[in-house]
Amino acid sequence: MEFLKNIKNKTLLITDNSLKNKILDEINSLDNLVNIKIITKEEFIKRYYFDYNEETIYYVKNKYNLSVKNAIMYLNNMKYIIDLDIENKKVIFLKNMYLDLLNNDLLILDNLFKEYLKSVDIIVLNKDSIEPFYLNLFNLYNATYIDIEKEEYNLEFVYHFKTIEEECAFIFNEISSLLKQGVSYKDIKLTNVTSEYIPFLKRFSKLYNIKINNLEKTSIYATVETNKLIKIIEENEKEDVIFYITSNLDKEIFLSFLNIINKYYFVDDLKLVLDLIKEDLKKTNLNNINYQDSIEVIPLNSYLVRDEYVFLMGFNLENIPKTYKDIDYLDDKICPLIGLFTSIEKNKLEAKKTITDLKNIKNLIITYKDTDPYKSYYPANLIEDLKLKIIDNKETINKTSNLYNKIKLVDNLDNMLKYGTKKNDTSILFNTYQDINYLSYNNKFKGLDDFKLDRLTLSYTSLDNYYHCAFRYYIDSILKLNIYEDTFKIYIGNLFHFVLSKIFDDNFNFEFEYNNYLKEREFTKKEEFYLTLLKEELKNIIEIVKYQHSLSGLTKVKLETEIKLKYQDNYIFKGIIDKIMYKEKEGNTYLSLIDYKTGTPKLDMTNLIYGLDMQLPVYVHLVKKSNLFLNPKIIGFYLQQIVHEKGSFDPKKDMESIKKDKLKLNGYSINDDYLVNMFDESYLNSELIKGMKITSKGFSHYTKVLDSDSIDNLVNMVDLKIKEAFKEIENANFTINPKVIDGKNIGCNFCKYKDLCFKTGSDLVYLEKKRDLSYLSGGEQDA
Ligand code: SF4
């Protein structure tokens, strides 16, 4: 770049980004100081005409009723028509929009720039690739044009592969050989890496243990933190959002959030600009890890500084050169009037540029494929234009990775077994690798490398899952492969829960709450039919529940109460209790806990010692350990079945009594008749609690009661099982260990992951069946 040495005056150099760094390197190597400023033509035009910010986009979007993307598109095209004087609808529309923005002070103007241009020498590099629109402006300031000559090496070959996998295997084989010959990582580059290559390159990078920098950009938009931020913006005031972000600034992603939110200084309510914020989040990428010894992905037009080896993959018509279509807002009819290239001109220029860029690389290895797993590809037209000789890759045995060859052999054997097709290299691979143990599989869980949890939240469901089978929990809660099924049955359960959670509200209106829940969903005719029946049933349930309430001295009620307990700093155990009935008296709080059930209630607590079936005990534990109530004293904990699949008929009872019976509470009460009476005034022959009866000897033999020591022991046992689960999960103990009790495999009951775990008989864990609750030292009290 000899011209740099001749620069004497203040100079403005206009070039594209690919050359910027190279020029800066050259300037640094010069002996004398050069008074030069480097900008791109895009930066030039922003300063010459105008720039815009989020406030401008917000205005355009709202005033002209546009999406964020379209608002930006109009703003970007606007600069081309400012000095244009033609009768064209699009031009007139953009001009009016421009004047509107100008009048409203929504454009950022650099009023000194034109004066500045008069005071400097302007040099423009590589004129051929610049549109006349820009050149006309540069000419106003007597710009000098200089072409940077590129090297021109011979291009002779292109390697052809049937599949993308073979292509990547070849590339990694070559890279591995180069590294073995002593070529440094920094001198090996990949280019033209289009999206279909990413999963293959990641896989081969692992197989060969060769790290790749800049392989892909990951937007922060898909992260859990962003999801949460969007929810917080949707539900909170601006100050709360800022408080939430600034309280978490120790995490890098929150700095990005803050930068984005700061751009919206002009609104008091961030909800108004949520769509703009979402676009910003999509455009912001997570910082990639830069590995030390690694190869790098570069753009094709990079200026190389040494004799680097560059692997250009995907030399296919679909991938290279980039093609343009006449689909832009400023189309091929208007572009010549403005001085912009038409799509045809852009395509010619792109092909020319690509050839120049290719020839500029001394050690270039070009490859292309016929197919990837999803589609077929054509070879690039440039192969013919450049008269490249096609070398078909027949070599399928990889010389540098045994692991790859073994995987290939297994793939070949699968093909043979399933489709009866034998590939040429199968025999040679089979003879070389006899140790692959084909079709034998060890399903044992072997632990996880680098497993670390920043936070862990357990609930009754996840805890129960863990104790049923640790691997089941791993799939469900760590890998999150569970697919939520929204069945009609689940929907009805949720509807009943929802309406029941409102019935003690001051202005409870059944019709409003019921219809409000239903409005979000469409129903089939069959579902509509059932809904009319279920609506009546729900009304009936509410009446009975309210009647039950009138029998109780625990007059206060909390519904759908979420309780969270902290175990260490970042471990939380949480649960939601459907209904807590309580009364405060003489410094104590007397409580009964009720969980609504839509399925058949399971009350058996004998497996609690194994961490199983702990739902009600978990709720007792949450209430006792939290600070929600003053000195909580548990009177009882019960399940209440609110949806019944089958009706039952007792000829001795009327319909009303049958319905009341079905809604009786099923669970354990304290063995203290004074306290039971406080909860259930009908306790002598209870209308509220199933099996609650007093005989002359006290509680009936069938009544389920526990003393207060047993309840305390229950709480301690639950606490122990929660701590144990936290510890095991922290240690990544996700063994396949479904529990078998009394000959029944309860661990795998309703488990959807049978196809993943390949469970065998040796995985089953047999547990001794406990017949009673004697492990709670007081024991179950049968009166
Ligand atoms: S099927 Fe059984 S063994 Fe397999 S993950 Fe599920 S519970 Fe565990």
Image: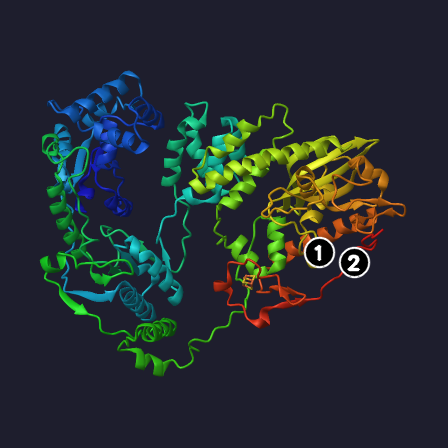
Closer to us: 267 or 46: 267
Residue at the location (63% across, 58% down)? Answer: 467
Q: Within 10 Å of the Cα at label 2, are there few (<14), some (14-19), or many (20+) other Cα atoms? A: some
Depicted 74 relative to depicted 447: above or below = above
**Splitting the image into 4 quarters, where does residue 764 fall?**
bottom right
Evaluate whether residue 242 shows in this view: no
Depicted 68 relative to depicted 86: above or below = below
Marks 1 and 2, how far apart at CA: 10 Å
Residue at the location (65% across, 37% down)? Answer: 561
Depicted 639 relative to depicted 9: above or below = below
**Splitting the image into 4 quarters, where does residue 606 fall?**
bottom right
> Which callout, 1 or 2, points at the residue further toward the start of the chain?
1
Residue bearing mark 2: 775
Residue at the location (17% across, 59% down)? Answer: 379
* Amino acid type shown at disc 1: Leu
Ligand 1: image quarter: bottom right
Q: Percent position (x, y) of residue 341?
A: 13, 38
Cβ atoms at labels 1 and 2 below 8 Å apart: yes
Q: Which residue ends up furthest to the front in the rendered image?
A: 651
